[in-house]
Image (cartoon, rainbow, N blue to C red):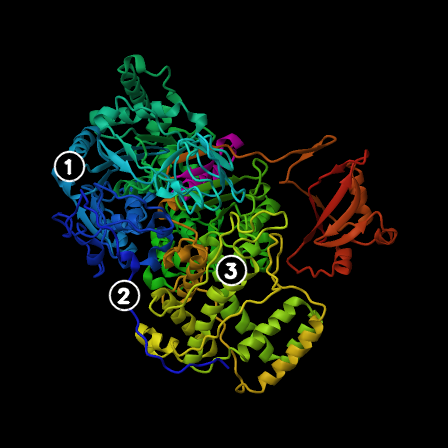
Amino acid sequence: MLPRKRPVEGEVVEDDTSDRESLLKKHRIGSLISSSATKTTTTTATATENDGNKSGDMSSNGGSISNSISSDHSVVRDIPLGDGNPQDIDEDLHSRQLAVYGRETMRRLFASNILVSGMQGLGAEIAKNLVLAGVKSVTLHDEETVELWDLSSNFIFSEHDVGKNRALASVQKLQELNNAVVISTLTTKLTKEQLSDFQAVVFTDTNQEKAFEFNDYCHNHQPSIAFIKAEVRGLFGSVFCDFGPEFTVFDVDGEEPHTGIIASISNDNPAIVSCVDDERLEFQDGDLVVFSEIRGMTELNDGKPRKIKNARPYSFTLDEDTSSFGAYERGGIVTQVKQPKVLNFKPLREAIKDPGDFLLSDFSKFDRPPLLHLAFQALDKFISELGRFPVAGSEDDAQKLISIVGEVNEGLGDGKLDGINPKLLRYFAFGARAVLNPMAAMFGGIVGQEVVKACSGKFHPLFQFFYFDSVESLPIEPLEAGDFRPLNCRYDAQISVFGSKLQKKLEDALVFVVGSGALGCEFLKNLALMGVSCNSPGKLTVTDDDVIEKSNLSRQFLFRDWNIGQAKSTVAASAATAINPQLRIEALQNRVGPETENVFHDSFWENLNVVVNALDNVNARLYVDQRCLYFQKPLLESGTLGAKCNTQMVIPHLTENYGASRDPPEKQAPMCTVHSFPHNIDHCLTWARSEFEGLLEKTPAEVNAFLSNPSEYASAMRNAGDAQARDNLERVLECLDRERCETFQDCITWARLKFEDYFANRVKQLTYTFPEDAATSTGAPFWSAPKRFPNPLQFSTADLSHLNFIKAGSILRAETFGIPIPDWAKNPRKLADAVDKVIVTEFQPKKDVKIVTDEKATSLSTASIDDAAVINELVMQLEQCRTTLQPGFRMKPIQFEKDDDTNYHMDMIAGLANMRARNYSIPEVDKLKAKFIAGRIIPAIATSTAMATGLVCLELYKVLAGGHKVEDYRNTFANLALPLFSMAEPVPPKVVKHRDMSWTVWDRWIVKDNPTLRELLKWLSDKGLNAYSISYGSCLLYNSMFPRHRERMDKKVVDLARDVAKVELPSYRHHLDVVVACEDDEDNDIDIPQISIYFR
């Protein structure tokens, strides 16, 4: 049993602050906002009580937070800051967004008031993304009423809203997304003076003259008000940003500062710095860096930023003379210093005449932005002259617009364009009135992110114009004027761009959406608005085996807080049907994989028109990719990571498949590094997560496996007879004997002794085995970079981090043993008194202790020749120990759950990691960052998700229209932080040629009439292919080298599969697939397609 100690008088120093991070340096902020609601005279939605905390007067309590996963390093002037109390941020709700922005940026968002003018599809998408992000308030401005036309692109409106003011009709559904955001409306003519209430204003439907007036006011206002003008016109879109004459960007890319571990520094002018080859350096010439922890050349530890040049993968030159400095001995970290960047924006009135460089998205269209710059100006003139948009299909209107573009172009003098591409301008004119949902989703993501940049100084703004078009999405066959004629339905705007024939194809489509998380919610919204699967025989099937959690609500916008715990697919399908009641959708809760091929069977896949992936892991993507490859179905693939997103089109016979190219596997730290020689916080957290699972999940589960069937368990261990079996038995015996807990005091004792073992005794043993002056077999210092020499910790109840570790450990230990947790366990003074009762024996390091230092080792367990004897002895001791347990005793294994801040899981892991970091002088992290790393949280925000799905749905038009060439499709990589948009044609599949035949990975050869093995070989021989091996799954059905296999020649291939592979073919399966290895007549291997043998 665990030792106890008599009570000892002791005093605990109680900390007044609830969170160390509230001890922040205070800053004076130039741009402050009132805590009162935005000064509008119309409707204001009610916010929750918490809103007061998030959006009060921020003048006295701003500041920077260290240790956030997203780097917020600098003090921001002229940008509102949130309240200084970090707990104002609901980390359960915003955890994925915090992983992108960090606390500082989130606080600035919480203090920002935004105006969105124009509540058609684009305005609705922008407002949605801002409400999900958690700004202080969003004011919706629109003087017009809802039309049936608007339902093509606006997910907020229903047919019941037709005739209502657009802004007023939007409030309720936007408010449901986030009750902490104040949502107001303005329904009358906007004056420029009203803009002074906001930090950023967005106009989606205003004429050029008004835009000039409003922008001039915002540009000259003190402090400047960020102004964004965005438009979506059919398949064309534009964005203009002006954040003022001097806007400071404090983090241009959102990436963590790059670091390196120093190996040597020369005493030269300039000095050469070499780093260990653990990881490549990411520095660039001209970067500023700071040094720390250097032994010997301590002059560099002064914290002064220094410029580097000649950056190489593992070295760089320091622009400084170190010849008079002390000689470098060992150690040292070099860290990039991220520099603020000041941007000088021009107002629209000036920028429109001198736009500078346009942000390109597609290098095959490098000449488009200048032309579209003129086209949008010409459209404004057309509307001001005629009082309406060009009519879809009207050649007269198109020619009128083209002539205006020509006039604007002639007015440019020497800067005029050589050609104005009438065909492109005709497309522009025809679709000018329409706001398409995919375009609104894409631009809603881009503009929403620009607003976040304007309010926070986080990420580089779009500077200043961006133009985009997707004319490749149009049907390839020419459309007549009558094809664009409105049908008085909710899809009229879409019909005005694509015609009624494609609309019919969309409505009749059979679509499979795999996943209904963040991507899935956006896809379902887009598909419902586009009318996909909204008419018989169309059908949309969505599947997801997950349930809704609170952390989903910040970006999976079809879910509400009352849906927590419900099935994602069911709730998402219901919400999508509310957007468009005509949607024919079936929601399933099945994981897509080999185990559900009875649900997603052959006929299911064969009937599909297209598959849309909305998945969050590579293995599932690869499986769906193989299914689409097999059944020759288009697959639209996308993914996001923070502000980054990518899309990939997988089109039968035109493009390579998803699995054709893969990212290299993520580099894993060697086991010995994680367990004995960590040199960064990731190593500490990896170790902490492993220890948590071993102590609280795996060992209790192993105990239960033993107690459930002692004889079978003992037999299994004896049969294994290896070091792993010995370790398992030792852990079980230790848990049930020496470390068995019967009271909460026992649990405190266990936690206190674990602290001593982990952070004192093990370190003492390590430094005894390898002293600070130890050398390797080659004579080099053992403790050279990247190794860090550790120091043991001295436990103190006065150190709250020590006490919090004991609290979390004892509570979780009690949980595994089913011991009630007393109320006093959470009282620091009483807990300290209980800890002081624990007897801690003096540790003496041992000689000849083996510590693994081999970086290639995969296990810390060492085999022994007497493992079998030890296992027998351990089994006997376990049997004896079992007799002392209560009948029916079982432990309660704890599965790690990162998203419940009340369960002490992350407290335990953060405590383990930070105490270990303290051993090795590694910077510690707060619980939130520990959650990101140990919980392997994928950073996610609504803006990049919206953009990705908009881009995919632009490709969906092409897929369902049919007939497009590979050059019409686009794969995209985008990074909204930079911003960067890179679009390119998909890569075509590799073609294999043999004789007069050719094939790709998309081809599958079909052999019917239930052939015998001989007939199959003859069928191949007729093609000049000599088969030497045929396999089904992992089972070999035939190999020409085995004489006995010739006896199988006259057996049916399907019977061989049943007899040899022992396969059971279900009644719904009509064929089986075999892999055949072949040679040509010159004995060259030929890679042939998979062969399907039809036997029914």
Q: Position of residue 1075 (x, y in %)?
A: 72, 47
Nearest the eye: 311 or 13? 13
Left or right: residue 518 versus residue 408 is right
Which disc number belongs to residue 222?
1
Nearest the eye: 225 or 754? 754
State yes or no: residue 363 in magenta: no
Kindly identify the amino acid type of the residue bearing the numbered disc 3. Answer: Asn
Nearest the eye: 612 or 767? 767
Left or right: residue 212 versus residue 69 is left
Mark 3 falls on what kind of element? loop
Q: CA distance from mark 3 to mark 2?
A: 50 Å
Which disc number belongs to residue 15?
2
Task: Identify the mark nearer the N-term, 3 or 2.
Answer: 2
- The residue pinned by badge 3 equals 590
Kindly identify the amino acid type of the residue bearing the numbered disc 1. Answer: Gln
Closer to the observer: label 3 or label 2? 2
**Residue 684 seen in the figure:** yes
Nearest the eye: 687 or 352? 687
Left or right: residue 322 versus residue 120 is right
Q: Position of residue 370 (x, y in %)?
A: 34, 23
Relative to residue 354, is residue 124 depicted above or below?
Answer: below
Q: Quadrant of residue 430?
A: top left
Q: What is the span of residues highlighted in magenta in the rendered image? A: 947-975
Kindly identify the amino acid type of the residue bearing the numbered disc 2. Answer: Asp
Q: Residue at x 41, y 50 (%)?
A: 939
